[in-house]
Amino acid sequence: MMHKELNPELFGERGLKSRVVEEPPINQMVVLEKKVADNRQQMHQLAESMNRIVQQVNEFMKSTNHKFEKIYQALQRLESNDQALNLDSAQKISQIHNRLGERRTLEIKVQELVDRHNNVLKSYEVRMNQMQKLIAEREAQLISSQALLNETKMEIARLKRV
């Protein structure tokens, strides 16, 4: 049969004895100091590496910001040029539209002049035909009058001989 014993550490009697810290041997101290020195060196290298990375990131950000600024300025110039071209195109289209309107007005005026000219020509032709008829009638009257005059002269000449 087994006896039951209380844990002596419960009441603090033996706990004090077991808690006494044993000093590590000198070899372990040297190794530990070496590890601490190595860790410090690694931390120093890591800090330097981080500083270089931060510096590179800052330089990259500066160059990127500079490039973005250049791109932004180029974009603004392009937008400005585009607006100027749009304005110029709108003005030219307006001028062409105005010229077309003026041309249509001039074409209408020219057509009216041509129509008036044609009307004048037609009335001239009508008058010319009337004049030709009148001249033909007068010529016929003249010929008839001359024939009558000639007959009268011949009659007078015959009467004088008789």
Image (tube, rainbow, N blue to C red):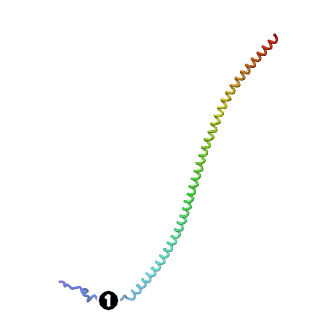
Query: Count of labels shown?
Result: 1
Residue type at mark 1: give it.
Answer: Val
Please report the residue visible at 40 percent of the width from the left and 84 percent of the height from the top.
32
Going by the picture, which residue comes out furthest to the left? Answer: 1
The image position of residue 101, as x and y in percent, is 59, 46
Q: Is residue 62 above or below residue 134?
A: below
Q: Going by the image, does 43 lie left or right of 74?
A: left
- The one of 128 and 30 positioned closer to us in this rendering: 128
**In which quadrant of the rendered view does residue 157 lie?**
top right
- Picture quadrant of residue 134: top right
Quadrant location, the C terminus: top right
**Residue at 42% of width from left, 83% of height from top?**
36
Q: In the visual, does 8 lie left or right of 77?
A: left
Residue 93 position, x and y percent, is 58, 50
Q: Toward the viewer: 92 or 104? A: 104
Name above or below for residue 92 compared with residue 130.
below
Q: Which residue is mark 1?
A: 20
From the viewer's perspective, is residue 138 above or below residue 23? above
**Percent x, y for residue 60?**
51, 70
